[in-house]
Amino acid sequence: MRVDGRAADELRPVEMVTGYQEYAEGSVLISMGKTRVLCAATVQDCVPSWMRGQGQGWVTAEYAMLPRSTRERTPRTASGRATEIQRLIGRALRASIDVRALGERTITVDCDVLVADGGTRTAAITGGYVALALAVEQLVKKNQVRRQVWKAPVAAVSVGLVDDELLLDLCYAEDCRAQADCNVAMNARGQIVDITATAEGDCFTREQFDRMLEMASAGIRQLIQMQRQILGR
């Protein structure tokens, strides 16, 4: 029995509230269990200096944990972990969109963790895609980009080996005890965007890894279906 009573292959309760921030071009508050991440997309009519003149846009992300998103206060300082996670989020979101169709625009998706109970990076990717889609929809309505800007929706989830059992979408209590932890980002076509898998205790086998990937894929399909329902697609 899991700490919250879920089945091994069951996601935590997921909720996405769009339009959470009034001034952002696209925003969503995503909750996965107790984890809550506020994702807000900002559109700017410029690109980084190294991209100027190429006629294409850029999608990037920033990630931070609010001081009391955790059980003990987290200092408001940049960390290597936060930098690694925001690069992951940016890569995942860029995989969903044809940046050439954006024109010379930058969309920055800020992902701020309000409550951390495991899976903050995967929730940020899943919610970040919705915020990005809402921002792009505004550009489409203004005839500034074409609707065919999209490649495929992207979402992410964690899978872990806990007490020799594979579990989907780990909460913090499970993540702390995991023998192996795997974060998977995938698009709606079943193509892999990113995988990070580490052994925290004993090593895991190729067979276990294949089962992790299969379980993650099923969970991501559910998350993408939720994204599509939220966006009316």
Image (tube, rainbow, N blue to C red):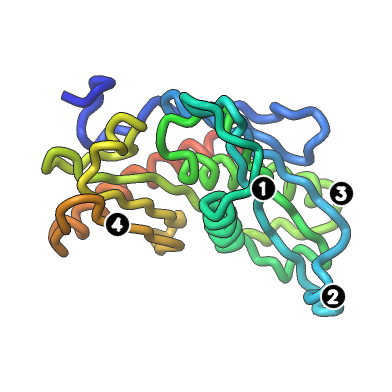
Dot 1: what SS?
helix
x 61%, y 46%: residue: 63
Q: Is residue 30 above or below residue 85?
A: above
- Tag 2: amino acid: Arg
Q: Give the number of the mark in front: 1 or 3.
A: 1
3 horizontally vs 185: left or right: left
Q: Quadrant of the N terminus?
A: top left
x 74%, y 67%: residue: 101
106 horizontally vs 72: left or right: right
- Tag 3: amino acid: Lys
Circle nearer the N terminus (4, 3): 3
Give the quarter of the image for residue 106: bottom right
Circle nearer the N terminus (3, 2): 2
Q: In this figure, which residue is indicated by the disc labeled 3? A: 142
Circle nearer the N terminus (1, 3): 1
| Disc 4 and disc 2 in contact, CB within 8 angstroms | no
Asked whether 6 or 117 is in front, the reply is 117
How far apart are the alpha carbons under marks 4 and 2?
38 Å
218 horizontally vs 77: left or right: left
Q: Is residue 60 above or below residue 17?
A: below
Q: In this figure, which residue is indicated by the disc labeled 4? A: 198
Q: In this figure, which residue is indicated by the disc labeled 2? A: 52
How far apart are the alpha carbons under marks 2 and 1?
22 Å
102 horizontally vs 78: left or right: right
- Tag 1: amino acid: Leu
Rendered image: mark on residue 132: 1
| Disc 2 and disc 1 in contact, CB within 8 angstroms | no
How far apart are the alpha carbons under marks 4 and 1?
29 Å
Q: Is residue 151 something one can see in this rendering?
A: no
Check the image and name the residue furthest to the bottom.
54
User: Could you tell me residue 34's position as x and y percent?
Assistant: 44, 24
Q: Is residue 128 something one can see in this rendering?
A: yes
